[in-house]
Image (spheres, rainbow, N blue to C red):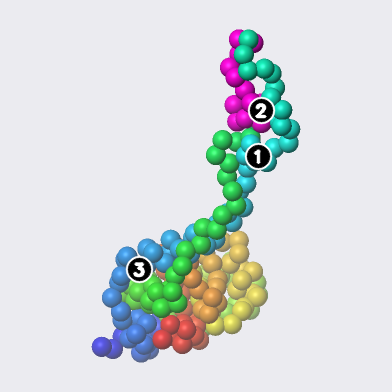
Amino acid sequence: MTVELAIHNNDGATVQVADAVFGVDYRPGLVHQVVTAYLAGARAGTKAQKGRSDVSGGGSKPYRQKGTGRARAGTTRSPLWRTGGVTFAARPRDYSQKVNRKMYRGALRSIASELARSGRLLLVPELTLAQPKTKALVARLSELGISDALILIAERDENLALAARNLTGIDVMLATQVDPVSLIAFDHVVLTEGALRQLEDRLS
């Protein structure tokens, strides 16, 4: 099986890509598991509340057991009392889920292949700007016919990053750092040829 991607605005030229990266079947179950694990790993998990053993005070019975007409009470730190502890106090926890490296790369390959099949993957020879101007980037994206895209580049481009940071629906990322959530969050993914080869090396 030979997979080829068309190079946009390059007289119909195509480039052959790795079948193992852009020619695999889409596996929705694997993609869902990896995306869920990635989002779970981003959760801080630092929420904390004080239970009855954590709040100050207490230690003595507030009033005698019988004869007061009130419900019996053993401590003022009870969750029923004002300034008492929380009934089911939240504790710091780790939300991360274990995902093997093979599964993670398999999900990225599955997403990349589906993007290529659905025509949402655009390959350009290069994408650079002479100045960090948002207007220039918008004009370049208009030539590609897109307004919502993830731009993958091989090396950090300060002009491109500054031009894109104020645009809604546009993000710039290194191909070596792309994650499954970013790949599925945009309508299109724009790849430079250098980023394409980096992505192949990473996922092969």
Question: Where is the N terminus found, in terms of image quarters?
Answer: bottom left
Q: Where residue 7 appears, x then y in whole percent?
A: 40, 83
* Residue 20 in the figure: left or right of residue 36: left
As drawn, the label of residue 53 is 1
Q: Is residue 21 magenta?
A: no
Residue 70 part of the magenta-drawn span: yes
Q: Is residue 87 above or below residue 109?
A: above
**Mark 3 — residue?**
30
Distance CA(mark 1)–CA(mark 3): 43 Å
What is the quadrant of residue 72 in the picture?
A: top right
- Residue that appears at 34% across and 85% down: 20
Question: What main secondary structure does the magenta stretch of the protein show?
Answer: loop
Which amino acid, by three-letter code, is at mark 3? Answer: Leu
Circle 2: element type: loop
Mark 2, residue position = 75
Q: Residue furthest left?
A: 1
Instruction: Establish if 75 lies above or below 49.
Output: above
Q: Earlier in the sequence, mark 1 or mark 3?
A: 3
